[in-house]
C-alpha cells in the first residue's frame, strides 16, 4: 500500500492507495495520524479513492484513528470510498459514527460543519 | 712407458718413438684440452644450475596451478553441496529424511523436495554423470530447470521432456544425467512418477511387509543424442498410510566389499525390508551403516544420496476438515501473514475460472483474509513455526474453504456483536462478523480451531 500525506490550513490529507490490511501499512497509517494530530491538524481527510481492499484489520485501524482525532477534539472524514470499500464500511456500521464524503462538495460541507462545531 | 733424451719410447711395444718437439706438442695439446675440458665443465655446471632453477620455477608454477585447481574444486564442491537442501520442507501428511554421503570429490548427486503452490509434493533425485566442475555446473543448471518446470507442469514425464530439451541445447560434453521425479498428492495419497534412467526407488508397505521397485521406462536426460528422441512416461502408485518410498543414487549400490563384490540392489532391498519399520531417520542411518559394514575399509568410489518419504493417513487428516477424500479438495499450507495473498490468489483464480462474478470473488477474498489472519494471529499466536492448513474446493456450484490452525481454539458463541453501539468503534472484533455476513454457510468445529465457509455460485453478473 502507498500512503500519501499532506497538510494545509490545519487539515491533514491522507491518501490510502492499494490494499489496507498489512501490519506495516496499518502502523504507517497510525504514525501519519499521530503526526497529523501532533502537527496541529484537527481535521483529517482520509482519501480512499484508490483503496481497492480493506479487511477487519484495516477497519479496526480506521476506527482507532477516528477515536484518536475525536479525543483530541478533531474529526476524521472518509473521502471518496469506492463501492467495494463502502460496502464493507456500511456492513460494519461505520456510517453511524464516521462522516463519509463521496465528493468534493460533500467534503467541503463536512469540513465547514466541523469549523462550526469546533 | 719411459722418456729418454730424444725419444718417447713405448716399452711395451718398442715400436713408436716421439721427438722432444712432438712430445712438447703433445703436452701442449693435453694442457689445452684440459683447459678446454675445464671450461666446458664450468659451462656445464652453469647450464645445470640454470636448468635446475628453471625446473624449480616450473615445479613452483605447477604447484601453484595444482593449488588453484584444488581451490577451484573445493569451491565447486561447496557450490554443489550448496544446491542440496539445508533442510527438507515441512509437509502436510508426508514426513521426509535425507542423507548425502560425499567422497570429497565434486559429485553429481542432487535432490530436492519442492512444495508446489497447490501443495503437491515433488520429490526429485538426479545424478549427473562424471565428477568435477562440469558435473557441478550441469547439476546447478538442471536443478534450476527442474524447479521451474515442476512449478509449471504437473506431469513428471512432461517435466523430464522439457528439461531434456533445454539441457540438450546447453550440454556440449558427453555428459548426461539420470533422474527420478515423483509428485505426491498428500490428500489422495498417490504419487505420479517418471524415471529417466535412474536407479528405481523402492516402496516398502509395512501393512503387508511387501517391497517393490518403481520401474518405469525412460531415457536419461541431457545428452545431445537424445534431442527429439527421448521419451518418458508417467505412472501412478497408491501410497497407503505408513508406506515408505526410498530414493537413492547408484553410489550406494556400487559400493564394493574388500573382495570386490558390489553392494547391489538386492542387498539394498533386503536391508530396506529389514529396517523398513524404523522411523525414517533411523531407517536411513541403518541403511548407511549396512552399506558401510559391507564395504569395510574399502573407500567409496562415488558419493551417494538416500532420500526417504513416509506418507501419513489422509483420512485422519481430513476427518476434521469437513471434506471427504472423495471430495478431492485442494490444499494450501501457510505459516505467516506474508503468505496470505499468494494463497488467496490461487483460490480466487479458480473461482474466476469457474465463472464466479466479481462481487462474489471480492467478498470471498475478504472472508479468506479474515479466516487466515485469525488463524495466524489468534489461533497460532503469530508463531511462524505453526501451520495453518487450508482445504478448499471450487466447483460450479459452490466454493468451500476450510481453515485449520494449531491453536487451542475459541468459542465463537461468545464473540460480541460489532454492530452494538458499545462495540461499533472498537478496533477489533469484526472478522467473524464479516465472514458470516458474506458467506452462505459458516461452521466451527467443537475445539474452535477450524472454520468452514461456503459460498454458493450465483452466476456471472
Image (spheres, rainbow, N blue to C red):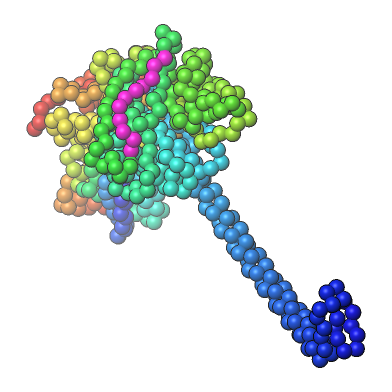
Q: Residue at the spot x=63%, y=30% of the render?
A: B297
**What span is in magenta?**
B211-221
Residue B417 at x, y percent in the picture: 31, 24
Q: Is residue B86 magenta?
A: no
Q: Position of residue A91 (x, y in %)?
A: 22, 31
Location of the C terminus of chain B by quadrant is top left
Q: Residue at x 21, y 48 (%)?
A: A49
Residue B444 in view here: no
For image coordinates 30% across by 60% down, the residue present is A9
Extreme-bottom residue of the structure: B21
Q: Quadrant of residue A63?
A: top left
Rendered view: B379 above or below B70: above
Q: Is residue B81 left or right of residue B337?
A: right
- Quadrant of the frame with the N terminus of chain B: bottom right
Residue B55 or B343: which is nearer the viewer? B55
Outermost residue, top direction? B208
Residue B322 seen from this side: yes
Identify whether A67 is placed above or below B189.
below
Indicate the position of residue B455 as horizontal and vertical percent values. 20, 23
Residue B33, quarter of picture: bottom right
| Image quadrant where residue B439 sits | top left
Residue furthest to the front in view is B15
Residue B409 x %, y %: 41, 20
Which residue is more in the foreground, B260 or B220?
Answer: B260
Secondary structure mainly formed by the magenta segment: loop
Which of B267 and B107 lies nearest the eye of the viewer? B267
Is B301 placed left or right of B40 in the picture?
left
Q: Residue at x 52, y 53 (%)?
A: B72
Amino acid at each position: 500500500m502507498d500512503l500519501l500525506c499532506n497538510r494545509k490550513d490545519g487539515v491533514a490529507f491522507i491518501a490510502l492507495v492499494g490494499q489496507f490490511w498489512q501490519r506495516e501499512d496499518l502502523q504507517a497509517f497510525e504514525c501519519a495520524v499521530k503526526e497529523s494530530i501532533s502537527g496541529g491538524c484537527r481535521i483529517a481527510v482520509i482519501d480512499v479513492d484508490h483503496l481497492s481492499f480493506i479487511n477487519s484489520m484495516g477497519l479496526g485501524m480506521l476506527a482507532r484513528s477516528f477515536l484518536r482525532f475525536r479525543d483530541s477534539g478533531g474529526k476524521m472524514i472518509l473521502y471518496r470510498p469506492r463501492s467495494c470499500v463502502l460496502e464493507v464500511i456500511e456492513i460494519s456500521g461505520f456510517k453511524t459514527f464516521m462522516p463519509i464524503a463521496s465528493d468534493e462538495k460533500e467534503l467541503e460541507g463536512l469540513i465547514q460543519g466541523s469549523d462550526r462545531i469546533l | 712407458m719411459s722418456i729418454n733424451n730424444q725419444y718417447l719410447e713405448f716399452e711395451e711395444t718398442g715400436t713408436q718413438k716421439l721427438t722432444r718437439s712432438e712430445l712438447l706438442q703433445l703436452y701442449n695439446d693435453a694442457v689445452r684440452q684440459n683447459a678446454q675440458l675445464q671450461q666446458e665443465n664450468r659451462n656445464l655446471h652453469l647450464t645445470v644450475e640454470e636448468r635446475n632453477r628453471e625446473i624449480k620455477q616450473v615445479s613452483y608454477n605447477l604447484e601453484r596451478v595444482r593449488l588453484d585447481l584444488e581451490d577451484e574444486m573445493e569451491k565447486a564442491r561447496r557450490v554443489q553441496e550448496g544446491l542440496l537442501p539445508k533442510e527438507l520442507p515441512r509437509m502436510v501428511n508426508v514426513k521426509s529424511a535425507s542423507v548425502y554421503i560425499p567422497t570429497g570429490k565434486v559429485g553429481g548427486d542432487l535432490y530436492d523436495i519442492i512444495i508446489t503452490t497447490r501443495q503437491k509434493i515433488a520429490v526429485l533425485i538426479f545424478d549427473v554423470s562424471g565428477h568435477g566442475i562440469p558435473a557441478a555446473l550441469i547439476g546447478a543448471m538442471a536443478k534450476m530447470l527442474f524447479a521451474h518446470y515442476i512449478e509449471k507442469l504437473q506431469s513428471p514425464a512432461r517435466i523430464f521432456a522439457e528439461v531434456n530439451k533445454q539441457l540438450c541445447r546447453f550440454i556440449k560434453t558427453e555428459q548426461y544425467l539420470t533422474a527420478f521425479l515423483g509428485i505426491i498428492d498428500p490428500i489422495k495419497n498417490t504419487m505420479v512418477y517418471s524415471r529417466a534412467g535412474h536407479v528405481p526407488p523402492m516402496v516398502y508397505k509395512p501393512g503387508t511387509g511387501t517391497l517393490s521397485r518403481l520401474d518405469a521406462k525412460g531415457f536419461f536426460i541431457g545428452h545431445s543424442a537424445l534431442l527429439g528422441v527421448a521419451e518418458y512416461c508417467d505412472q501412478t502408485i497408491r501410497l497407503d498410510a505408513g508406506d515408505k518410498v526410498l530414493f537413492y543414487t547408484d553410489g550406494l549400490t556400487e559400493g564394493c566389499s574388500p573382495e570386490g563384490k558390489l553392494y547391489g540392489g538386492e542387498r539394498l532391498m533386503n536391508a530396506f525390508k529389514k529396517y523398513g519399520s524404523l522411523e525414517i531417520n533411523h531407517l536411513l542411518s541403518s541403511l548407511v551403516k549396512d552399506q558401510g559394514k559391507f564395504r569395510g575399509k574399502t573407500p567409496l568410489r562415488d558419493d551417494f544420496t538416500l532420500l526417504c518419504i513416509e506418507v501419513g493417513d489422509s483420512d485422519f487428516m481430513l476427518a476434521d476438515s469437513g471434506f471427504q477424500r472423495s471430495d478431492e479438495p485442494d490444499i494450501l499450507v501457510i505459516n505467516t501473514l506474508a503468505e496470505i495473498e499468494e494463497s488467496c490468489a490461487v483460490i480466487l483464480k479458480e473461482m474466476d475460472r469457474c465463472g464466479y462474478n466479481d462481487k462474489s470473488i471480492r467478498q470471498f477474498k475478504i472472508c479468506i483474509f479474515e479466516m487466515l489472519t485469525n488463524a495466524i494471529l489468534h489461533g497460532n499466536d503469530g508463531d511462524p513455526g505453526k501451520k495453518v492448513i487450508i482445504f478448499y474446493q471450487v466447483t460450479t456450484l459452490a466454493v468451500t474453504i476450510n481453515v485449520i490452525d494449531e491453536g487451542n481454539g475459541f468459542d465463537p458463541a461468545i464473540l460480541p456483536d460489532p454492530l452494538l453501539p458499545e462495540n461499533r468503534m472498537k478496533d477489533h472484533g469484526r472478522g467473524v462478523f464479516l465472514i458470516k455476513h458474506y458467506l452462505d454457510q459458516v461452521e466451527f468445529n467443537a475445539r474452535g480451531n477450524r472454520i468452514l465457509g461456503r459460498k454458493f455460485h450465483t452466476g456471472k453478473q
